[in-house]
Image: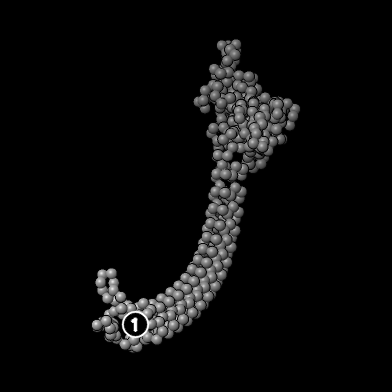
């Protein structure tokens, strides 16, 4: 037949173009090559040619098509032959090839797929083998591997997951283990850790959460300073701190998300006010030079705090009875101070002046002024014949106290009794209780008014 451009072409009955294999002469077609040539057409002979078509012969040629022969060729298709070729397809042969597919063979190859073989390969998949491989998956093996998954193994690995193991690892998760780890989670453990969560534990942590508001707090309050003896133990040698230092209190209690306001004297009994066992004798420090202390106030068993969690404390001054010059001891100097103060008060110009006590200093050693807190403490300690069990003695001011020469004499009496006591006991310092008893003798019972 002739082509559109005028050329003459010859083809077989199967449509194969053989123009270049024939000659045309006077209308005749002369074949130049034999059809049985030992070098068969590499394109169309799919059966017997030793140099078979490398594309379509899938059966017997020793140089089979490297793409589609999946059965017997020694150089099998490296893509699709999954069975018997020694150089099997490295992608899909999951069974017997010594160089098996490193991706999908999960069973017997010594160089098994490092991704999916979870059972027996010595270089098992480091991702998913959770059982027996010595280099187990560092992500998901939570049981027996010596280099267990550092993320999810919460039980036995010496280098356990630092995130989720809350029980036994020596380097436990610093985030979520709230119980036993020495380096417990500093965020969520509100109970027993020495480095407890400073954010959310509003109850027992020494560094309580400064954010969470307390469920009971003082909205407003008023306190009065008090003065006390160092020997006062609140039982046998005194009456302790006075509840009346708390003059007023408005308390807010949060109940089911609602605020309930309570007022001292109305909803709160004054007898519920306490100091959680603190007494003047317990907190007094003989080395203190300020004589000033802050005592936390409780309502029942609840510590009174402000809305921002700060404790509500009463300011108190504590000193040694008879110590007029505030040097934490009683000597003849104290008696001299009292005598001079009494003498000044009895000057004609002062006898009729109601403010005379605040124009004369009792304690000239401490330069704090005639109406300072320490001057008030000196007056409290030097007024030795005042009844210690008077409920108002703790806050009686200097100008309301009655001083006379007998106070100076009683101080001297006590010093004599004190020295005798020490001499009888090998110079051992008398206890607070003994010192108290000596004052009862020195004042002839005036300091207790018949009560001991």
Identified at 56% across, 62% down, the residue is 153
Furthest-front residue in this view: 26
* 163 horizontally vs 396: left or right: left
Displayed quadrant of residue 77: bottom left
* 335 horizontally vs 105: left or right: right
Instruction: Find numbered disc 1 in the image and state the secondary structure of the residue it sits on.
Output: loop
| Total numbered badges shown on the rendered structure | 1
Pick the front one: 372 or 115: 115
Residue 392: x %, y % from top left: 67, 24
Identified at 50% across, 25% down, the residue is 367
In the rendered view, tell whether residue 66 sits above or below residue 301.
below
The residue that label 1 is drawn on is: 41
Q: Is residue 260 visible?
A: yes
Image quarter in which the N terminus is found:
bottom left
Displayed quadrant of residue 327: top right
The crowd level at tag 1 (other Cα within 10 Å; few <14, some 14-19, many 20+) is: some
Residue 123: x %, y % from top left: 48, 73
Pick the front one: 355 or 385: 355
Identified at 44% across, 82% down, the residue is 59
Identified at 60% across, 55% down, the residue is 180
Image quarter in which the C terminus is found:
top right
Residue 370: x %, y % from top left: 54, 21
Residue 282: x %, y % from top left: 63, 38
Q: Is residue 439 visible?
A: no
* 301 horizontally vs 188: left or right: right
Displayed quadrant of residue 34: bottom left
Image colouring = one colour
């Amino acid at each position: 037949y002739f082509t559109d451009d005028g050329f003459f072409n010859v083809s077989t009955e199967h449509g194969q173009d053989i123009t270049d294999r024939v000659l045309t002469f006077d209308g005749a077609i002369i074949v130049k090559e034999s059809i049985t040539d030992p070098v068969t057409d590499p394109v169309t002979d799919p059966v017997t040619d030793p140099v078979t078509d490398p594309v379509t012969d899938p059966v017997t040629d020793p140089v089979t098509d490297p793409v589609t022969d999946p059965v017997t060729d020694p150089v099998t298709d490296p893509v699709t032959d999954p069975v018997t070729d020694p150089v099997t397809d490295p992608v899909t042969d999951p069974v017997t090839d010594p160089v098996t597919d490193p991706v999908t063979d999960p069973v017997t190859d010594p160089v098994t797929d490092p991704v999916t073989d979870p059972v027996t390969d010595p270089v098992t998949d480091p991702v998913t083998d959770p059982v027996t491989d010595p280099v187990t998956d560092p992500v998901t093996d939570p049981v027996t591997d010596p280099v267990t998954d550092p993320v999810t193994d919460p039980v036995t690995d010496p280098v356990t997951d630092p995130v989720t193991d809350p029980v036994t690892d020596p380097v436990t998760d610093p985030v979520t283990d709230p119980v036993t780890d020495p380096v417990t989670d500093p965020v969520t453990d509100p109970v027993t850790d020495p480095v407890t969560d400073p954010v959310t534990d509003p109850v027992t942590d020494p560094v309580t959460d400064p954010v969470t508001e307390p469920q009971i707090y003082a909205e407003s309050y008023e306190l009065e300073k008090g003065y006390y003896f160092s020997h006062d133990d609140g039982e046998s040698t005194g009456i302790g701190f006075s509840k009346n230092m708390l003059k007023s209190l408005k308390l807010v209690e949060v109940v089911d998300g609602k605020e309930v306001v309570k007022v001292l004297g109305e909803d709160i009994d004054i007898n519920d006010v306490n100091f959680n066992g603190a007494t003047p004798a317990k907190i007094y420090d003989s080395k203190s030079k300020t004589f000033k202390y802050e005592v936390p106030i409780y309502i029942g068993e609840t510590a009174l705090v402000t809305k921002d969690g700060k404790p509500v404390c009463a300011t108190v001054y504590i000193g040694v009875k008879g110590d007029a010059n505030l040097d934490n001891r009683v000597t003849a100097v104290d008696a001299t101070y009292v005598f001079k103060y009494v003498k000044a008060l009895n000057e004609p110009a002062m006898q009729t002046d109601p403010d005379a006590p605040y124009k004369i200093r009792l304690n000239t050693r401490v330069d704090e002024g005639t109406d300072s807190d320490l001057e008030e403490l000196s007056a409290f300690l030097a007024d030795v014949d005042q009844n210690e069990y008077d409920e108002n003695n703790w806050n009686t001011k200097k100008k309301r106290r009655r001083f006379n020469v007998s106070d100076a004499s009683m101080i001297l009496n006590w010093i004599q009794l004190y020295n005798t006591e020490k001499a009888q006991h090998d110079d051992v310092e008398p206890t607070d209780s003994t010192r108290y008893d000596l004052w009862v003798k020195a004042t002839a019972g005036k300091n207790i008014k018949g009560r001991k």
